[in-house]
Image (cartoon, rainbow, N blue to C red):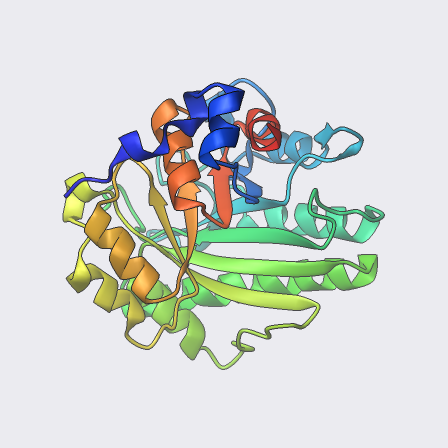
């Protein structure tokens, strides 16, 4: 059965209705989608160093606007390069390490508070599940292992920056590819989740939209085989009630991602109460969560 967006109408209700029905905005962490949270939506600036630089500097009410940053990490299959890019069409050759080093410098040089929440800075690495022109062009096991090694190299830079700046850090390794996540946790350098430590690591499964490959128990099972996920990421407009029940049965935290803060997405946030919101409209989202 499709997800019932009518159940989350508090986003458009009057204030008195929100109070009397007990509908409150969730206490969610706001992460910057595609390293691009600079104002008006401009997808051509996604995964660019210029937008990353501007996004890191965003403030709201005298505090950092963001709780954290998403870095897209794309393995370029033809050249065996680890790039800061969404896909092969948008890749301009910028190494993923350049993005990690910039965020690491931000962690090193920024005095507290480093994030809106005042506790930790959150970096979400999306390890892209394809290596070429098509979404069906998936990793070989060798490519998945090299992609995982790249992610661990980026982790070391981020952790060094956080340590030097005296900040607590959470790094989320997210992917739509079970193979990539499985190789990540199998690498000799994988340090484990490190819960409660200054640097915490979490695993996120990025579920494809239901129109492409049906979110169901079979695909979810592929992500639980040897991976032990902590988070599931999905779009509010593509998730089903059955999928939500399956995610809750595994005690997974939710990330809702969006291109734009539509009423459908706001309704989904109010009903599902995710731990993380991944959006390019971070300033709007921060204001919306306040009221």
Q: Which residue: 54% across, 42% down?
A: 94
Q: Position of residue 199 (x, y in %)?
A: 66, 67
Q: Is residue 19 left or right of residue 136?
A: right
Q: Which residue: 59% across, 27% down?
A: 291
Q: Is residue 143 visible?
A: no
Residue at the right extreme, as displayed:
111
Q: Is residue 241 left or right of residue 122?
A: left
Quarter placement of the N terminus: top left
The answer to which quarter of the image holds residue 7 is: top left
Give the vertical position of 112 relative to 146 (above or below).
Answer: above
The answer to which quarter of the image holds residue 38 is: top right
Nearest to the observer: residue 50 or residue 118:
118
Nearest to the observer: residue 225 or residue 186:
225
Q: Which residue: 51% across, 58% down?
A: 172
Give the vertical position of 243 relative to 202 (above or below).
Answer: above
Residue at the bottom extreme, as displayed:
188
Q: Is residue 252 left or right of residue 61?
A: left
Q: Is residue 288 visible?
A: yes
Q: Position of residue 283 (x, y in %)?
A: 61, 26
Give the vertical position of 84 relative to 242 (above or below).
Answer: above
Nearest to the observer: residue 169 or residue 100:
169
Q: Position of residue 287 (x, y in %)?
A: 61, 26
Report the number of numbered marks: 0
Q: Position of residue 52 (x, y in %)?
A: 62, 35
């Amino acid at each position: 059965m499709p997800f019932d967006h009518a159940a989350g109408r508090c986003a458009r209700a009057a204030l008195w209705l929100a109070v009397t029905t007990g509908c409150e905005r969730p206490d969610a962490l706001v992460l910057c989608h595609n390293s691009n949270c600079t104002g008006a939506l401009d997808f051509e600036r996604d995964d660019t160093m210029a937008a990353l630089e501007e996004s890191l500097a965003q403030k709201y009410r005298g505090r950092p606007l963001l709780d954290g940053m998403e870095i897209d990490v794309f393995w370029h299959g033809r050249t065996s390069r680890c790039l800061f890019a969404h896909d092969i069409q948008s890749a301009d050759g910028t190494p993923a390490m350049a993005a990690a080093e910039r965020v690491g410098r931000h962690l090193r040089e920024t005095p507290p508070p480093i994030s809106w929440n005042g506790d930790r800075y959150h970096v979400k690495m999306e390890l892209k599940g394809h290596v070429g022109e098509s979404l069906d062009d998936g990793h070989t096991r060798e490519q998945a292992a090299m992609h995982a090694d790249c992610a661990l190299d980026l982790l070391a830079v981020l952790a060094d920056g956080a340590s030097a700046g005296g900040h607590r850090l959470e790094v989320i390794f997210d992917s739509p590819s079970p193979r990539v996540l499985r190789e990540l946790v199998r690498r000799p350098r994988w340090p484990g989740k490190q819960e409660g430590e200054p640097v915490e690591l979490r695993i996120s499964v990025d579920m494809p939209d239901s129109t492409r490959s049906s979110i169901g128990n079979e695909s979810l099972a592929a992500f639980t085989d040897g991976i032990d996920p902590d988070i599931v990421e999905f779009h509010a407009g593509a998730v089903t009630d059955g999928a939500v029940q399956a995610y809750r049965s595994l005690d997974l935290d939710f990330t809702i991602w969006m291109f734009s803060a539509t009423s459908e997405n706001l309704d989904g946030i109010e009903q599902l109460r995710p731990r993380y919101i991944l959006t390019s409209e971070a300033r709007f989202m921060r204001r919306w969560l306040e009221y």
